[in-house]
Image (tube, rainbow, N blue to C red):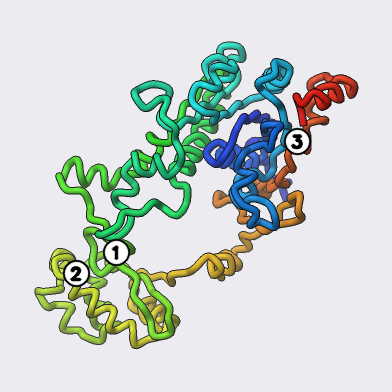
Amino acid sequence: MQPPLPLPLDGITVVAVEQAVAAPFATRQLADLGARVIKVERVDGGDFARGYDTAAGGLASHFVWCNRGKESIALDLKDPRGLEVVRRLVADADVFVQNLAQGAATRLGLDAATLCAAHPRLVAVDISGYGASGPYADKRAYDMLVQCEAGLVSVTGTPEQPVKAGIPAADIAAAMYAFSGVLAALVRRGATGRGGPVEVSMLEALAEWMGHPLHHTMHGGTPPARTGLGHAVIAPYDAYATADGGRVLLSVQNDREWRRLAEQVLKRPELGTDPAFATNAARVERRAWTDELVAGALSALDTDEALARLEAAGIACARLRDLHEVAEHPQLAARERWREVGTPVGPLKALLPPVTLPGGGAARMGAVPALGEHTVALLRAVGMTDDEIAALRREGVVA
């Protein structure tokens, strides 16, 4: 038997001056793939996501999600001595990531262009709300605000009420493009020996994810309607109540499926060829009537029976689960996707990363660090003596 391959990013060191979600979620992906990630935090409380809530055993759920497998060093970057520590760390790093407020990294000399000019092999990532130029460059950018600016809110919700996504979609979009951008830049560096700047904005990342409604609107002239759990151009496609209080979502993608649904689930085979329902266009035109027919049939069945009938008929379907049910999902359990990660309050469950690399060993799901947990070790690694470290600690430069 051959020994497992090393993780893809073994030997890569990442320094991140990061906060909230966008940059931390990006660098967590790097840590899971084997990179050493050094997280630079403020001395007065650290990454402010540490204080969002206390739901994860006393820790913030956002922070636990985005920061496993990292080393935490707490520095005052407004003090030249704290900033010098970051510069020493960057000098030995392969990747630098920051998502400070617009202009802050440039004032500190930690923007990608400045760092890459000094360190040609470095891959340096600037994550911002709206990009470094343009009329919105200095505008404050939080996830909900960018969801609005990118149009996501306009297509999410009911006809009466637009709503934001229930997850930080703009942050996640930016994080995943930063992650893929780092990987691409490292591949290029392997061929050329040079790193270089990588720029990602939340607006541009989420606008890319808006591709379908954008193209529908730009080229068709009409924005897709908000349809709740339904679909603007497909029917039936919605969640329907069952007899035991559950809800089942189904999607009929073509007219063959509609005929099977009519015959095997609705028990109304004549609807399969009735011109009023036989085509998707006809069903969309008569959406309320179509939904009434489906809802009437499923309301007489309990959830398990409804799903069984739909599956037997070859109709795409799902159980509408709450988050407690997701945590106990039988598919995640069967595929052994849950692990435990260490945290300052003890082990907590966490999902394996969704990318599986056969033969490459398990993802490195390291512990979630306490604020400044690795400060002393990292300061020693950049050449500081214990006396120097003690002096910096007394003066509030490190924590």
Q: In the image shown, does 397 or 97 lie closer to the viewer?
A: 397
Within 10 Å of disc 1 (Cα), the crowding (few <14, some 14-19, many 20+) is some
Label 3 is placed on what type of residue? Gly
SS class of the residue under badge 1?
Answer: loop
- Left or right? Give the position of 329 relative to 58: left
Instruction: Identify the residue shown where x is 40% and y is 25%.
Output: 137
**Do the residues under discs 2 and 1 have CB atoms within 8 angstroms?**
yes
Secondary structure at badge 3 equals loop
Residue 44 or residue 162, whichever sits in front: 44
What residue is disc 2 on?
287
Kindly identify which numbered label has been placed on residue 230.
1
Which quadrant of the figure has residue 202? top left
Q: Is residue 307 above or below residue 210?
A: below
- Res. 372 mark: 3
Q: Amino acid at mark 1?
A: Gly
Q: Is residue 103 above or below residue 159?
A: above
Where is residue 245 drawn, in percent x and y?
42, 81
Which mark is first along the chain, 3 or 1? 1
